[in-house]
Amino acid sequence: MSISPLMPVYPRCDVRPVEGDGCHLITEDGRRLLDFASGIAVNALGHSHPALIGAIQEQAAKLMHVSNLYGSPQGERLAQMIVDTTFADTVFFTNSGAEAVECAIKTARAYHQHEAGDSGRTEIITFSMAFHGRTMATISASNQEKMHKGFMPLLPGFKYVEFNDLEAARAAVGPQTAGFLVEPIQGEGGIRPASQEFLQGLRDICDEQDLMLVLDEVQCGVGRTGKLYAHELYGIEPDVLATAKGIAGGFPLGACLATEKAARGMGFGSHGSTYGGNPLAMAAGEAVWKVISDEDFLADVRAKGERLRSMLEQFIGNHSDLFELVRGHGLMLGLKMKVESRPFYAHLRDNHDLMTVAAGENTIRVLPPLVIEDEHIQEFMEKLSAGAADYVVPEAAAA
């Protein structure tokens, strides 16, 4: 057969990790790479964190899976921890971010199709350059044609508007509108934060017209910005929120959070998941939540993010031919380049043992574990500086 045993949907590079050690990855041929990608904002506690390993091992020895037809003391405990520290009144556990967004979309529509609602409100307004996942509903919720190719027809019920354009969002609202789905900080789109005016304006529109404000915080949530969730930076609260990635530090887990009002349509039989909320995932999630929800921990993330950003801003001043600006919050930072970013990302990986992530708008994403120390920041800056110094822009990558 010519096809590989692993379906060839990823453009896999030659780096083949077999072990993780704190903030580093070790490959099968012995290379040791500084991991400032964190599995795309997943390994929030780095690799091989003892509390996370211990929780998984202990729970695996007791019970890994049981049907959701039975009571869930593990799920109830983690859900209560989340409810106690966020805007939410209720939580549905999933296995991934895309599943969490799917649940959030269903929750927003079910709110209006409840007996007390307006069943004609089914349309979700989403925004340019967004990424919400790879399921049929979540690619339909994105305006990115590269994700649509080969999967037409898309699912109906979504309308696209320019990100950070409040007036366009207001103009798009009509009698079919159920709500907005938006990332407070776009990750795949290039670390593009929503403006204060934009996010507050969406909240105001929803309040005025009884619409659902649904936030996709799959990438920017769980302490990544120095706040438990990024919407806290803006002083607003959503009705529904999708979270995943760092929530279990690398173990598959996601969640849909909602207020009691927003979840009025999510009754018995409205949603489900075979593996969602399994005891093993709950143990991993609880171990991570205990660390990340601590305010001292979050304050430390903010402080480290400020130090790293300050160093990056000084750095790009010395390489103005390559870099345009730094943006983001906490330890979710983006280096916007003046040339195509993917060749530089590969150069750092292949020649300087530094893992980052490329993104839209020619941006290099800097997403280190939230547990980095000053020594890791220094190592990162040394590798980044060396990479910029010996980088030759490929002719095809010049902007």
Image (tube, rainbow, N blue to C red):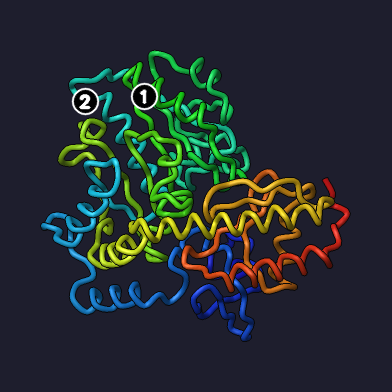
Q: Residue at coordinates 33% horizontally, 59% vertically from top-left?
A: 294
| Residue 238 locus on image (x, y percent) | 35, 35
> Neighbour class for label 2 at 10 Å: few (<14), some, many (≥20)?
some
Q: Residue at coordinates 64% horizontally, 70% vertically from top-left?
A: 378
> Neighbour class for label 1 at 10 Å: few (<14), some, many (≥20)?
many
Question: Which amino acid, by three-letter code, is at mark 2?
Answer: His
Q: Residue furthest bottom?
A: 30
Q: Residue furthest right?
A: 395
Screen quadrant of the N terminus: bottom right
Element type where label 2 sits in the image: loop
| Residue 58 locus on image (x, y percent) | 24, 77
Horizontal side of residue 22 vs 249, given as left or right: right
Horizontal side of residue 398 vs 24, given as left or right: right
Q: Which residue position is annotated with label 1?
A: 178
Q: Which residue position is annotated with label 2?
A: 114
Horizontal side of residue 21 vs 244, given as left or right: right
Q: CA distance from mark 1 to mark 2?
A: 12 Å
Question: Which amino acid, by three-letter code, is at mark 1?
Answer: Ala
Instruction: Give the mark nearer the N terminus: 1 vs 2.
Output: 2
Q: Residue at coordinates 57% horizontally, 24% vertically from top-left?
A: 165
Q: Which mark is residue 330?
A: none
Report if residue 369 is visible in the image: yes
Q: Is residue 48 above or below residue 106?
A: below
| Residue 137 locus on image (x, y percent) | 43, 39
| Residue 14 locus on image (x, y percent) | 66, 73
Query: In terms of depth relative to the viewer, which is nearer, 362 or 374?
Result: 374
